[in-house]
Image (cartoon, helix red, strand yellow):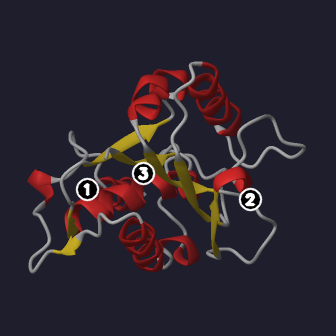
Amino acid sequence: MTVLVLGIGNILWADEGFGVRAVEALHRLYAMADGVDLLDGGTQGLYLVNRVAEAERLLVFDAIDYGLKPGTLKVVRGDEVPKFTGAKKMSLHQTGFQEVLSAADLMGRPPRDIALIGCQPLDLEDWGGPLTGPVAASIEPALAAAVDVLAGWGVAPARRAVPLPPENGLLANDIDRAAYERSRVGAG
């Protein structure tokens, strides 16, 4: 079985980076089972089609405007995960990701199972800003939700005794969360 855990979003727009930061934290804190790949999908849009089409199961982290209290997590599965253009744009890159799911479907290779862990953002307009407090506080609960989803799929990750050091992180070039936010504090 192939499982893709995908974080999507733009780290340059505060809470819009939730998905990327969640998959980054999952990588640092958990060892994945065989067949589970983690990917910072960022804002790649249609460039993700082949990766999504290769996955039997897809777990996505994203900032989603559900109209709830900031930091609120919501897990949706299967047909509830928006595949096509919705009535309300829920994030800066939503249309692109809906197109990715649609393209995989048109290729006859959609993931068999899909789950989305969405976090209600507080601020999507702070250019260069870090995650806001409520969204940053939702990372650990989002990881717990991801572990539950993956366990349900039979590929539960194991919590690392010691988190991976930054140099072994999923992101490089000082865009991992700790380095990025440290550089923003120094710039302010």
Tell whether 87 sits left or right of 157: right
Residue corresponding to mark 3: 20
Depth check, mark 2 against mark 1: the one in front is: 2
Identify the residue shown where x is 43% and y is 38%: 41
Quadrant in the rendering for residue 56:
top left
Q: Position of residue 64 (x, y in %)?
A: 67, 57
- Kind of residue at disc 2: Asp
CA distance for labels 2 and 1: 27 Å
Which residue was labeled with disc 1?
179
Mark 3: amino acid: Val
Amino acid at circle 1: Ala
Q: Residue at x 31, y 56 (%)?
A: 24
Which mark is first along the chain, 2 or 3?
A: 3
Q: Which residue is mark 2?
A: 65
Question: Where 135 falls versus 59 (above or below)?
Answer: below
Q: Is residue 125 left or right of residue 17?
A: right
Front-lying residue, 12 or 35: 35
